[in-house]
Image (cartoon, helix red, strand yellow):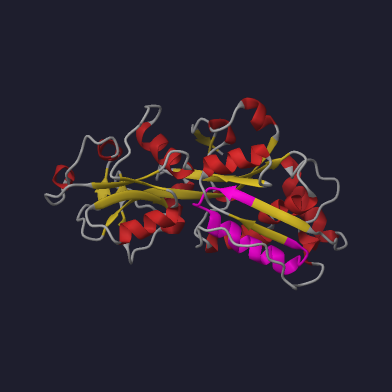
């Protein structure tokens, strides 16, 4: 799981591997006919695609995008895909400004951009991921209520003994403003309440949280499931519910997000092809789950731009 950008690369891979994901006559960078296009493309003759795809945004699912990019470039040696995970806010701002071709986000663009900017973009929902609190290995607490999390991440609860743990100061490792993971976590814990508590540190990326949690005693933070690492820290229950994908699909575990990949309506052919690949069976049928995510089609409930949950 790399959080840094990787350089432009071109692989001498399998020729003509785009048969399953290239569709002719796409509108913008996919839109609502993405799944149909992928199916139609599998029956069409192979097309040659070339160009450069760039992205920025959520670090929570950067590893999934990187894994898919490797497969895509292997099959399409004249395309390079490269990018960074600098947070949902930066990714959305960058794609709206045209400095990258794809903006990755844990949240809907409507929550970060102006309405006129959103109108110029097309959303691709590529996966779902759970997110939950994690604590240092020395912390004895293994379950917290939403109310207790609210107290900790607002600075009202400052000692582990207040929530059933040892007499020790709680070290709060937060994410920086602009993080989609932070926005998702705070929406689940605080609802519509404004939060400005920084904690003891504000970290840039999911990988930074992994590192800090592995070397800090008495700490708490939050991560997406794909970044859980029980060799470094413990993921804990919320309201008695374990942080597992099976509990996300029916919304019994309440902290989760849809992973979005946005592009402009007039995106180039290489960008369009890569996004279609993200929605293809090659990714949705296997790679998504291998990387610790949930296919969007497996969800029994959905969230709208406001975070409201409804039956699928």
In the rendered image, residue 72 lying in the magenta stretch gets the answer yes
Q: Could you tell me if residue 301 is visible in this image?
A: no
Q: Residue at x 80, y 41 (%)?
A: 27
Q: Is residue 271 above or below residue 185?
A: below
**Nearer to me, 106 or 283:** 106
- Corner quadrant of residue 125: top right
Q: Is residue 156 magenta?
A: no
The answer to whether residue 102 of the structure is visible from this angle is yes
Rendered position, 291 above or below 130: below
Label count reads 0
Give the side of residue 1 with respect to residue 10, left or right: left
Instruction: Point out residue 299 in the picture as x, y percentages from the top left corner.
Output: 54, 46
Query: Left or right: where does residue 247 sit relative to residue 3?
Result: left
Please name the residue shown 74% across and 44% down the image: 29
Q: Is 5 left, or right, of 46 in this rendering?
A: left
Foreground: 264 or 18?
A: 264
| Quarter residue 95 falls in | top right
Q: In this rendering, would 262 be left or right of 21?
A: left
The spot of residue 96 in percent (x, y) is: 65, 37
Q: Please give the name of the residue rendered at 53% of the width and 32% of the height, measured from the top-left corner.
A: 111
**Residue drawn at (71%, 65%), measured in percent from left and top?**
73
Tell me where the magenta segment starts and ends, as one range.
55-79
Q: Position of residue 72 (x, y in %)?
A: 70, 63
Looking at the image, the residue that sits furthest to the right is 45
């Amino acid at each position: 799981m790399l959080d840094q950008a990787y350089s432009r690369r071109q692989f001498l891979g399998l020729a003509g591997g785009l048969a399953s994901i290239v569709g002719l006559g796409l509108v913008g960078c996919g839109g609502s006919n993405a799944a149909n296009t992928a199916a139609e493309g599998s029956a069409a003759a192979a097309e040659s695609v070339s160009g450069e795809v760039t992205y920025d945004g959520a670090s929570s699912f950067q590893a999934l995008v990187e894994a898919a990019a490797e497969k895509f470039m292997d099959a399409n040696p004249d395309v390079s895909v490269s990018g960074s995970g600098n947070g949902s806010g930066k990714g959305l701002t960058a794609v709206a400004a045209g400095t990258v071709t794809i903006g990755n986000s844990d949240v809907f663009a409507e929550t970060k951009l102006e309405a006129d900017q959103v109108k110029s973009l097309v959303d691709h929902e590529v996966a779902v991921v759970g997110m939950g609190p994690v604590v240092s290995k020395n912390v004895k607490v293994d379950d917290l209520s939403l109310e207790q999390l609210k107290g900790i991440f607002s600075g009202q609860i400052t000692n582990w003994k207040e929530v059933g743990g040892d007499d020790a100061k709680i070290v709060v490792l937060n994410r920086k403003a602009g993080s989609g993971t932070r926005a998702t976590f705070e929406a689940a814990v605080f609802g519509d309440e404004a939060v400005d508590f920084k904690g003891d540190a504000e970290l840039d990326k999911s990988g930074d949280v992994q590192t800090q949690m592995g070397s800090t005693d008495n700490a708490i933070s939050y991560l997406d499931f794909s970044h859980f690492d029980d060799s470094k820290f413990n993921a804990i229950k919320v309201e008695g519910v374990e942080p597992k994908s099976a509990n996300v699909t029916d919304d019994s575990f309440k902290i989760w997000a849809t992973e979005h990949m946005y592009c402009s309506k007039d995106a180039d052919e290489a960008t369009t092809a890569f996004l279609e690949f993200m929605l293809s069976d090659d990714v949705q049928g296997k790679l998504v789950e291998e990387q610790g995510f949930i296919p969007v089609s497996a969800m029994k409930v959905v969230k709208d731009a406001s975070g409201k949950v409804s039956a699928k």
